[in-house]
Amino acid sequence: MKLNVGGVDRIARVVAGLALIGLTLAGVIGVWGWIGIIPLATGSFSFCPLYPLVGISTCAAKEKV
């Protein structure tokens, strides 16, 4: 599994996922808020399964020395 989620993208995913789950637990939004597990997981593992399908990677390119 090649990492394809970079720093800012990773932080945004984790924050969004935690926010959705938190709002669901607080009763502010409905059951659909559990969808926050997906961005939380993709941010935690630094891998998004949709990115390779569309040819995207937000990881910084590593230089070969």
Image: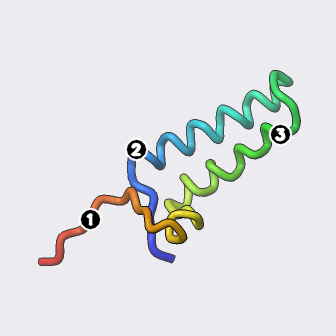
58 vs 13: above or below: below
Point out residue 25 in the picture as x, y percentages from the top left corner.
Answer: 82, 31
Which structural element holds mark 2?
Answer: helix
Q: Nearer the viewer, residue 21 or 50?
A: 50
Q: Nearer the viewer, mark 3 or mark 2?
A: 3
Q: Give the amino acid at mark 1.
A: Ala
The answer to whether residue 34 is left or right of residue 59 is right
Point out residue 56 in the picture as x, y percentages from the top left corner.
Answer: 43, 62
Asked where in the image residue 33 lies, by quadrant, the reply is: top right
Of mark 3 and mark 1, the one earlier in the sequence is 3
Residue at 47% x, 43% y is 11
Of mark 2 and mark 1, the one earlier in the sequence is 2
Residue highlighted by disc 2 = 8
Report if the CB atoms under discs 2 and 1 are less than 8 Å apart.
no
Q: Residues within 10 Å of mark 3 (few under 14, many from 20)?
A: few
Distance Cα–Cα, label 2 vs label 1: 14 Å
